[in-house]
Amino acid sequence: MPVAEQTWGSPVKASFLASSVGRKIVMAVTGVVLSVFVTVHMLGNLQAYMGATTMNAYAKFLQESLHGGGIWISRIVLLVVVLLHAWAALSLTLSNWSARPQGYRAQQLQAATLSSRTMRYTGVFLAGFIIYHLLHLTTGQAHPAFVHGDAYGNFVRGFQQPLASAVYIVAQLCLGLHLWHGVWSFTQTFGWSHPRYNIARRAIATVLAVLVAAVNLSFPISVLLGVIR
């Protein structure tokens, strides 16, 4: 049967997600969504530098958007995106391990960047960090002084604990590495890998990764130094 006559239910169409190209597209699209989210989340947290009134008002706005439904829609969408991203990354990793000869792997490591070599490890760490972050500053189970409705107070009291701040600092360093290689990879998946665009791709990846990581690192450091209190 000619390819043009095959239906959506054919093996070729049905195997899209089973193909490496399909999974790379899933990882790229979900990576874009997550990159936008971490950037917006970082910008929102800048409210902490404006004081308790501003940050608590911002948190209340998020909680009450669409009569309280907006925050849950966002959470469900993000959960689906994170699960799809993790599934695509894991399945591609397993496929690569099973298909890659040892000699080729050794050759690739010599040319790989730090961010690409640590991509799997930073991804696993960030997955665990997301759970901790939710328990720490969203639901409060991992926060000994959590007060519902006091976003600013929870933020400050949470980062006043050196161990909690240390976890956040390591997480943001991992995020910077993960984000840099993620932006570089999904632009390649979208077909932008070309000598004409590579300088711009590298600049975008570097600026976004450094900006997000640096601003997020400033939060626990500012609290520990007493700048935010």
Image (spheres, rainbow, N blue to C red):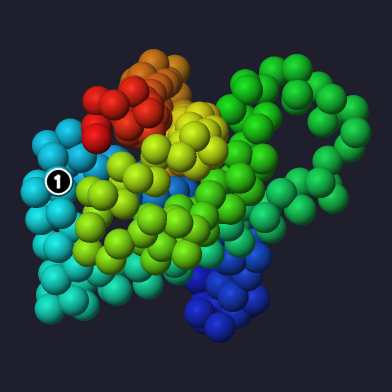
Neighbours of disc 1 within 10 Å: few (<14), some (14-19), many (20+): some
Residue drawn at x 31%, y 46% as measured from the top left: 155
Front residue of 152 and 172: 152
The picture places residue 141, in percent across and down from the top left corner, at: 47, 64
Image point (64%, 76%), residue name: 11
Residue labelled with disc 1: 52
Observer-nearest of 204 and 43: 43
Relative to 100, say whether 110 is above or below.
Answer: above
Disc 1, SS:
helix
Question: On the rendered structure, is 104 left or right of 77?
Answer: right
| Quadrant of the frame with the C terminus | top left
Seen in the picture, residue 65 relative to 58 is either above or below; the reply is below
- Looking at the image, residue 96 sits to the left or right of residue 36; the answer is right
Is residue 208 visible in the rendered structure shown here? no
Image quadrant where residue 151 sits = bottom left
Q: Is residue 64 left or right of residue 141?
A: left
Pick the residue in front: 151 or 40. Answer: 151
Number of on-image labels: 1
Residue 217: x and y, percent? 39, 29
Vertical arrangement, residue 137 with respect to residue 72, above or below: above
Which residue is pictured at 89% across the width and 37% down the height?
101
**How far across and how far down the image is residue 177, in percent?**
52, 30
Residue 118 lies in what quarter of the image? top right
Q: Is residue 155 left or right of residue 111?
A: left
Percent from the top left, x then y, of residue 131?
Answer: 52, 59
Quadrant of the frame with the N terminus: bottom right
Image height of 96 relative to 26, above or below: above
Measuring 15% from the left and 54% from the top, which residue is drawn there? Answer: 56
Q: Please state which of residues 41 and 49 is positioned toward the viewer in this rendering.
A: 49
Residue type indicated by callout 1: Ala
Most extreme residue toward the front is 145
Q: Is residue 225 visible?
A: yes
